[in-house]
Image: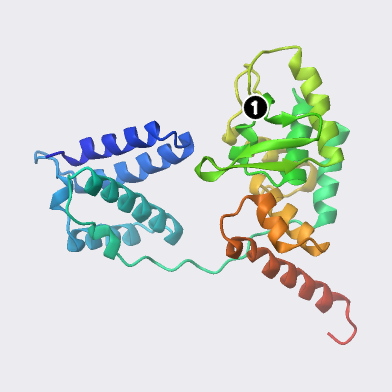
Amino acid sequence: MLDLRAAIDRFLDELHRKNSSPHTIKGYGSDLEDFRQYFTLPDLPAPTPGQFDLLSLREWLASLHERGVQPGTIRRKVAALRMLFRFLIREGEMESNPARLLRLPKLPHRLPSVPDAEKTNALLDGVALGNLERPFPKRDRAIFELLYGCGLRVSELVGLDVQHVDASDHWILARGKGRKERQVPVTRKAWSALENYLRDRGAKTSQEAVFLNHRGARLTDRAVRQIVKFYATRLANDPSLHPHSFRHAYATHLLADGADLRAIQELLGHARLSTTQRYTQVSLTSLMAVYDKAHPKA
C-alpha cells in the first residue's frame, strides 16, 4: 500500500506523462504537499490514502479556515485532493473518494477590476514612447500590446513560440488552460510592436520562445508581472494593475463596443459562456457609473 508521499509523487508523474502544463503540476504539487504535511506527524508512520475518511478531511478543512486561507484557495486545494483520490481509485489504491463529499466555501461575488479605455490606451501610449530607462523597450511594448490587443493570459504570452506567430495572416496560436489551443487575431498596432521586437530579437538568438529575458532564456510569468507593475506605477500611478487586468479590459471594451458575447468567448478561450458573461456585469456597472455622474436627474 502506497503512503501519501508516494501516492502524490505517482499522481504528479502521471500529470507529467499527460503533458499537463508546468504551472498546473506545480500548483497541484504545492497544494497536496500542504495536505501531506498536515497529516504527517513526527515519529509516526506516514498515512496511507485509504486511511482518510470524511471526518479527517473536515478536520483539515477546518484548519484551513482557522489559518485564514481564502475561500478560493480552499476550493483549489480540495479540487487537487479530489483529483488525487480519483487517480488512486483508478490505480486500485483507494475504494472511494471521501473528498467528493466535502462542502466547499462559497466564493464572494466580485467583479474584476477593469481599467477604462482611456486609461489603458494612455498607458500603452506611454510605454510606446520609451521615455523610461529600460533594457528592452521594444520587448516591453510588444508585451503590453499583446496583453491588451489579444486578451492573452500571462501563461499564454510567455508560452508563445516563434513558430506560433503567423506572419502572413497576423494570427498567433495561443495555448491556454488544459493545453487547449486557439488562434487569436493580432491588431495592427500589436502586430507592428511584435514585428519590431522580433526583428531586433531574431538577430540575437535561436531560442524558440518569443519573449526572452536578459539571459536569452524564456521570460517567466513572474517577470511579466514585474514589468507590468513597473510601467503601471511609473506611467499610470496604479501599482494594482497586473497582466490579467488587460485581459479583463480587452473583453470589457470589446463588449462595450458591441462585440458578440459568443465571439468574445472564442477569443478568450473560455470553456463556459457563463465565465464570459461576467463582463456584461462589468459593462453594466460602468454604464451606471457614467449615468450617475452625467445625467442631470440621476
Position of 88 relative to 71 (above/below): above
Image-based side of 97 in relation to 20, left or right: left
Image-based side of 234 in relation to 244, left or right: right
Position of 28 relative to 202 (above/below): below
Task: Work out whether residue 58 or residue 275 is closer to the camera in this orientation and state it.
Answer: 275
Dividing the picture into quadrants, the one containing residue 117 is bottom right
Q: Which residue is mark 1?
A: 161
Q: Position of residue 245 (x, y in %)?
A: 68, 51
As helix, strand or loop, the secondary structure at mark 1 comes to loop
Position of 220 relative to 99 (above/below): above
Q: Residue at x 28, y 46 (%)?
A: 87
Q: Position of residue 154 (x, y in %)?
A: 62, 40
State the quadrant of the N terminus.
top left
Q: Is residue 210 visible?
A: no
Position of 189 relative to 67 (above/below): above
Task: Work out whether residue 79 or residue 168 is closer to the camera in this orientation and state it.
Answer: 168
* Residue count near mark 1 (Cα–Cα under 10 Å), binned few <14, some 14–19, many ≥20: some
Task: Work out whether residue 267 or residue 7 is closer to the camera in this orientation and state it.
Answer: 267
Q: Position of residue 281 (x, y in %)?
A: 68, 70
Q: Position of residue 149 (x, y in %)?
A: 77, 44
Dividing the picture into quadrants, the one containing residue 104 is bottom left
Q: Disc 1 residue type? A: Asp
Q: Residue at x 63, y 44 (%)?
A: 153
Image-based side of 44 in relation to 58, left or right: left
Task: Work out whether residue 120 or residue 174 is closer to the camera in this orientation and state it.
Answer: 174
